[in-house]
């Protein structure tokens, strides 16, 4: 697994092609799960953990990895299943990943392989299973269903995030201006959509939300087909990068390729970390990049866009 991040150039070429790589892993059963390789820093055998006093959550301790102290989350327990017994941890693996400005290690039973696929093969979970679950997408491979966990929901339950925008970022004057605008947000994670919606509506701005890039693209095309100028109807599009059916990179590329909407202001908003994303954003022609989730950073991007529109 040491070479998990060695193919950066290849991944750069995949941008805008709706492609992704999944690292497959298992918890306490043979059921396979997937995590986007972009989020993975490394995979290693679980070392001895330094326990945290009075720890009552699924965080089982801290691992000391390459000079850094990283909290270890028992992913089985986090999703409501049996935790890994303490005497079995060193038989397990850690997936060290970056989410929402945090570096965490996920304790899993088994790590399988990296699978290349396309976002249009990744589907949203059936609505019949309800909303009280940690699934964000499913994928059929070799006759079996691979489940993609909503890690943002898991982390939000562990570390609740405030959504209120500070007055230093948006005063009453800004909030009054914001009432005249509407934003399109796109994210497959319900917790991410709700966080953004609460922050933006707290500014007074109107919000339209979509669950994935395909839904957003269909909405924009339908409006454009009816003669609506989507570039003035929406102040901006704020889109996640990782989404089933159509990712944010592909959505941005398609917007830029359509004469009716190529002037749309697009910001990519993602839990993927690092400077790597900045180069991806530039390649597909997005106007900016936001790391999830900070309400003031989100509001700052919106305020800057409002000022840009009103000063032109």
Image (cartoon, rainbow, N blue to C red):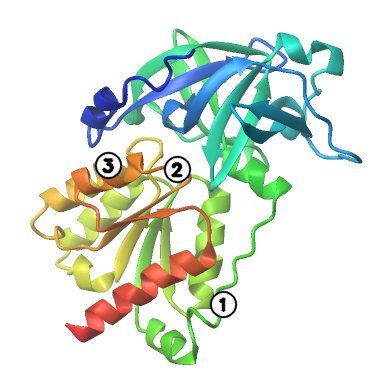
Pointer 2 or 1: first along the chain:
1
Mark sitting on residue 280 = 3
Instruction: Return the x and y of residue 38 as percentages of the image width and height.
Output: 42, 31
Q: Residue at x 63, y 37 (%)?
A: 134
Q: Residue at x 68, y 28 (%)?
A: 64
Instruction: Return the x and y of residue 87 as percentages of the image width and height.
Output: 85, 12
> In the rendered view, does 274 fall on the left or right side of 151?
left
Would you place residue 8 above or below residue 166 in this image? Answer: above
Q: Which quadrant of the figure has residue 12?
A: top left
Q: Residue at x 24, y 63 (%)?
A: 265
Q: Identify residue for label 2.
A: 273
Q: Nearer the viewer, residue 150 or 309?
A: 309
Q: Give me the C-alpha separation between circle 3 and circle 1.
A: 30 Å
Q: Give me the C-alpha separation between circle 2 and circle 1.
A: 24 Å
Most extreme residue toward the left is 259
Q: Which quadrant of the figure has residue 154?
A: top right
Q: Identify residue for label 1.
A: 166
Pointer 3 or 2: first along the chain:
2
Mark sitting on residue 216 = none
Q: Give me the C-alpha separation between circle 3 and circle 2.
A: 12 Å
User: How many circles with numbers are drawn on the protein?
Assistant: 3
Q: Secondary structure at mark 3?
A: helix
Instruction: Tell me if mark 3 has few (under 14), some (14-19) or many (20+) residues whose alpha carbon lies within 10 angstroms of its own.
Output: many
> In the rendered view, does 307 fall on the left or right side of 298?
left
Would you place residue 214 above or below residue 228 in this image? Answer: above
């Amino acid at each position: 697994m040491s070479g998990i991040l060695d193919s950066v150039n290849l991944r750069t070429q995949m941008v805008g092609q709706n492609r992704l790589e999944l690292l497959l892993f298992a918890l306490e059963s043979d059921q396979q799960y997937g995590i986007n390789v972009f989020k993975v820093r490394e995979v290693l055998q679980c070392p001895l953990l330094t326990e945290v006093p009075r720890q009552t959550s699924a965080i089982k301790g801290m691992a000391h990895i390459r000079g850094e102290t990283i909290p270890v989350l028992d992913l089985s327990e986090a999703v409501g299943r049996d935790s890994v017994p303490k005497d079995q941890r060193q038989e397990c693996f850690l997936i060290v990943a970056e989410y929402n400005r945090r570096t965490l290690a996920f304790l899993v039973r088994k790590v399988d392989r990296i699978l290349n696929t396309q976002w249009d093969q990744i589907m949203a979970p059936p609505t019949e299973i309800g909303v009280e679950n940690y699934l964000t997408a499913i994928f059929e491979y070799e006759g079996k269903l691979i489940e993609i966990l909503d890690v943002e929901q898991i982390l939000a339950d562990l570390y609740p995030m405030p959504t209120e925008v500070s007055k230093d970022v948006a005063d009453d004057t800004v909030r009054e201006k914001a009432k005249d605008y509407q934003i399109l947000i796109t994210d497959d994670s319900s917790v991410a959509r709700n966080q953004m919606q609460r922050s933006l509506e707290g500014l007074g701005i109107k919000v339209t939300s979509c669950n994935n890039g395909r839904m957003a693209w269909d909405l924009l095309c339908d409006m454009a087909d009816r003669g609506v100028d989507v570039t003035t109807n929406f102040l901006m599009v704020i889109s996640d990068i990782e989404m089933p059916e159509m990712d944010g990179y592909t959505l941005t590329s398609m917007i830029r390729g359509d004469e009716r909407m190529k002037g749309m202001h697009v910001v990519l908003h993602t839990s993927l970390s690092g400077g790597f994303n900045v180069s991806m954003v530039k390649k597909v022609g997005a106007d900016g990049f936001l790391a999830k989730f900070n309400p003031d950073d989100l509001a700052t991007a919106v305020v800057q866009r409002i000022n840009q529109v009103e000063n032109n």
